[in-house]
Image (spheres, grey):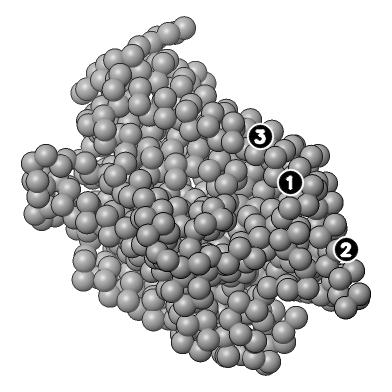
Amino acid sequence: MATSETSRAAPGADHHPEIDWAAAERSPEFRELISKKRSFVIPATVFFLAWYFGFIILAGYAPDFMGREFLTDGLTVGYALALSQFVMTWVLGAWYLRKADREFDPLAERAAQVALRRGNGERSAS
Amino acid sequence: MTVFASVNGTALAVFGVIVAVTLVISWFASKRVNTATDFWAAGRGLTGPQNGFAIAGDYMSAASFLGIAGLIYLFGFDGFLYSVGFLVAFLTVLFLLAERMRNAGKFTIADVLSYRLKQEPARAAAALGTLTVVAFYLIAQMVGAGVLIEGLVDIDFSLAVILTGVFMVSYIVLGGMLATSWVQIIKAFLLITAAVVMTIWVLAKVSWNPIDLFTDARAKSADGEAYLKPGLFLSSPLDTVSLGLGLVLGTAGLPHILMRFFTVPNAKAARSSVMWAMVLIGAFYIMTTALGFGARAILGQGGEEAAGATGNGAVPLLADELGGEFFQAIIAGVAFATILAVVAGLVISASGAVAHDVWSNIVRRGQDSESEEVWVAKIAALAIGAIAIAIAILGGQDLNVSFMVGLAFAVAASANFPALLLALTWRRFNTTGAITGVLFGVISSVALVIISPTVWPGPNSEGGLFSWYDLANPGIISIPLGFIGCWLGTVLSKERVEERTFDELYVRSETGLGAEAGTGLTLTGRGADGARTQDDALVGSGR
């Protein structure tokens, strides 16, 4: 790491040319990480945007429906749907953290190790 | 404001305690901050929970504490729409950016863009996006702080703005991101505690039945049934959708929030900090129900004039009604701490754009030393503070604060978010695309707000430049334009993309391989992590 008095090399010097990044990107380990991650993140993102914009669009275009009371006097459909957004945010967040800890992190670690070993191997061979 | 006229002494004491505590922390931090990584990223030594509190403290501004509760007090349900949007936005941050930013970035959002694009133009574009967002957001907060302090302790608006500016700059000049983070952590703690106390107090007044909040509020509103429905504040449906879009994508483009992800040691801590922030921020926004509807149920119609046109006085009035002048002074102090923490976060991100991006990497082309960069950062923070003070005083207290915050979110969602997301995920994306995207986003959102009925032809006008354009929130047009700008610039330019650097950024952002390491800095000393080797750093900074 650069000490505070040495000047740094050229801009963007944080690159690591000793690693073969193109090979790392094509490695089966990395592809598995990406496909596992996508199969969670894409549906989850579509779901939360749909649930959220469903709520916003109803608030904009169906104020009477949102103002309808149910279960008890004073509790509106709109407020209940608003609370459901809070629950959704927490549940999806916690779910993602669980998946990331148990599934994505080990895959990422493996993909990184493979790329690092390959990089170091080439360096010592040359 | 007459709301606060008689609380001077106590309020002054509460303000004094808050300023003293935060300055002591900054002084502590100043003895430990040495390297650029310490200054910009608190040595990447914050834990997930610590950064979660800091994100909450960085994010929830006076617009959240006083503004949303005030909107609910005045307009009922519509105010709560803001609470929902401000929270759900963190799913965008968590799923799309938080971990990637931590793995790919260094100090500023420009670092991520310029990692695979051409240094100077990409940095300049990102710095433009950052500075535009910060300019609107910072001035809104400074004016809000001035109005609040002027009302509280009867000092002149200009002096109040100057004092706020001086404190916010002191934190940064003394202790950089380390001091800023701890100011934000303390503020989040104070804000949540204040909200919990007020919520319990309000619930006690309605015999512990939350539903009574709604029925009592409706009974005491001149709008009756309509008070619990959408439409009183946001009367145009398309505008409501446009606002919702700006809120849910804007947070993921706020430079001072994204910068917080560089302060943790690894991606795991980055995502856990978002979860902590979502719990804290969500809990707070749910409590705006008790603050806003509670203010209506308890204060009734009577407080409307004192609460002001934006309703900002509703929470202080409610505090007075609940616990008298002493409690009101405490709540005012919490509001003051809230503003200080947010403006400090804004100034350090703007100072990053000036010192790290423009000075160090564009002007000096990376040939300066780290200590020079930190010096320039402190000078930049002083200059940004001075400019913000000047504009806030010249613009004066009549400046429409909530529209400026809305504009900041619109620019963040339209200019910063598309360029960042595409740089991290779209192989073909190139420098021209980043520049056109940021320019499309900045220009369209600012121009659309200028010609909107709320701004054109003068303050608080009801005109609008064109009769057919009546949106107050530009997001639904400017956000697609930001993405279209990125795409058009990319496909129209002949610029060749460097496949290799995309591979590196992509693998690095997803796995943490090659990510920037920390320096082991904490507020109380330097941990064992400080002596990290280059090999450890390569395997992903503390993985």
Residue located at (22% from left, 52% from top) = B449
Q: Which residue is mark 1?
A: A31
Mark 2–mark 1 Cα distance, whole angstroms, equals 17 Å
Q: Residues within 10 Å of mark 1 (few under 14, many from 20)?
A: some
Q: Is residue B130 above or below residue B220?
A: below
| Disc 1 chain ID | A
| Labels 2, 3: front one | 2
Mark 2–mark 3 Cα distance, whole angstroms, equals 29 Å
Q: Secondary structure at mark 1?
A: helix
Q: Amino acid at mark 2?
A: Arg
Residue located at (40% from left, 20% from top) = A78
Which of the two residues, A23 or B463, is positioned nearer the viewer here? A23
Which of the two residues, B356 or B388, is positioned nearer the viewer here? B356
Mark closer to the chain start, 2 or 3: 3
Mark 1–mark 3 Cα distance, whole angstroms, equals 14 Å
Residue located at (31% from left, 41% from top) = B476
Q: Residues within 10 Å of mark 3 (few under 14, many from 20)?
A: some
Q: Quadrant of residue B8?
A: bottom left
Q: Which residue is mark 2?
A: A117
Q: Amino acid at mark 1?
A: Arg
Q: Is residue B112 above or below residue B198?
A: below
Residue located at (32% from left, 45% from top) = B475
Q: Which residue is mark 3?
A: A40
Q: Secondary structure at mark 3?
A: helix
Q: Quadrant of residue B239?
A: top left
Query: Which numbered circle lies on residue B282?
Result: none
Which of the two residues, B279 or A108, is positioned nearer the viewer here? A108
| Labels 1, 3: front one | 1
Residue B53 location, x and y as percent? 61, 52
